[in-house]
Amino acid sequence: MTQSTETPATQNLYHRDPSHQQQQHHHHHHHHQVQVQAPPAQVHEYTLPQVVNNKTSTANRMTIREYKKIGEGAFGTVVEAVLRYDNSEPNSNISSTTSSSGVGVGVGVGVGVGAGAGAGALAKDEWLGPFAIKRVPAQTEYKSRELEILRVVQHPNIVSLRFFFDKKSSIDNKVYQNLVMECLPSNLQSEIKFYRQSKYTIPYPHMKAYTFQLARAMLYLHGFGISHRDIKPSNVLVDPATIRLKICDFGSAKKLEPNQPSVSYICSRYYRAPELIVGCSLYTTKIDIWGLGCVVAEMFLGKPIFQGQAPESQLKEIAKLLGPPPNTFFFKSNPQYRGNMYTTKLFSCSVEERFSNIFSNSPPDAIDLLMKILVYDPESRASPRRVMAHPFFDELKSKEFKVYPRGSSTAIELKLFNFSEFEYELLGPYKEVLKVQQ
């Protein structure tokens, strides 16, 4: 079992802080003034000859301006930055196709939305962004799985990779891989917290739109056999002004091949599927669906639904809602499992009643959806397309459906059903239910 290439899940946030918008404005319009004053200590600007544009696969000379640390974790750091093409070199508009970094050139699948046209089409001093740059130590002995996956996926509900480059750090002399990602103003963790502090939950129409987009992203990813393996509210970026959602942080993602084992210690504790908790190594993309169920439950409750105090007690928290796991569950997931099986029932009512008690303020269709997702047996757990076709989302399909962004009295239209041919293919028998003329 060669698992050397797997690293444990990591904590992250690439959401950008809206408090920066003023500064942002600042270096777009009064750039010459900024040059006069000494830049603030946290601004770090540098020019590199070979920054690869993910969309065109060409390498260009670019200037990168970092001005804020967004996140830090075991994996590395995330900073907010703007980039611009640097045409000061006499021959800089002759783009060279990348091979310097030895990555991605052979990936023949369509890639994320580029940042505008080629170097020539932009004004010399036009800053692009803001972006989130995720910086991790470069892998020397094998290809970066994260980069490889990000170069393949292109979907409205998945964060897009705009540029990438390798750079040697002046601090430790190590080479770091830099992934320049699109960024959104917030994430679901912040949104849930915002509403919890206002003693509310995210409004139902928003919740439905967010959940639908999350399931749609999973339909697409799982269609490639890719499992994200770290679904949690902080990895779900949102823009509350447009109710748009994008999954981010592919640092744990992996294409799961049938009958090929993968490590079970991925995913953050509260969002780990039961089969991972008991050490299953032949799991499927259904682990992400469990994560989706936990995220939806958290939007309703304002707090994580299963808060185990230790990895072992995580299963007990689940058993408090779902009842004892069936014996077949342990045998199918991991015949070697020797931990507590929680065979004693921790509540007296039926599972339906238990769901209704815990989600006492939630509508019946929401409870029904959660009961189809939060299921021990991964094979019986709803698929992304079954989630999308659930009556909970019927309201989204109505011609009259309107959603009001936070603090706005103007409704906006959401185009949630603009499926590609590939998505229609993945929807299969469900495509009729989801063909919506918008």
Image (cartoon, rainbow, N blue to C red):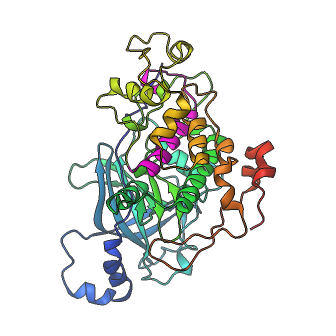
In the rendered structure, does residue 242 fall within the stretch colored magenta?
A: no
What residue appears at the point 39 percent right and 10 percent down from the top-left corner?
A: 338
- Stretch in magenta: 276-302
Q: Residue 325 in the image: x percent, y percent?
A: 50, 20
Residue closest to the eye, 162 or 53? 162
In the rendered structure, does residue 280 fall within the stretch colored magenta?
A: yes
Residue 266 shows in the view: yes
Residue 144 shows in the view: no
**Quadrant in which residue 244 is drawn:** bottom right
Q: Residue 161 in the image: x percent, y percent?
A: 50, 58
Residue closest to the eye, 153 or 63? 153
Residue closest to the eye, 302 or 119? 302
Q: Is residue 324 above or below residue 384?
A: above
Q: Main secondary structure of the magenta part?
A: helix
Q: Is 172 displayed left or right of 19 in the figure?
A: left
What residue appears at the point 77 percent right and 54 percent down from the top-left corner?
A: 421
Q: Is residue 294 above or below residue 50?
A: above
Quarter of the image with the C terminus is: bottom right
**Quadrant in which residue 306 is drawn:** top left
What residue appears at the point 31 percent right and 55 percent down from the top-left corner?
A: 71
Q: Residue 23 in the image: x percent, y percent?
A: 31, 79
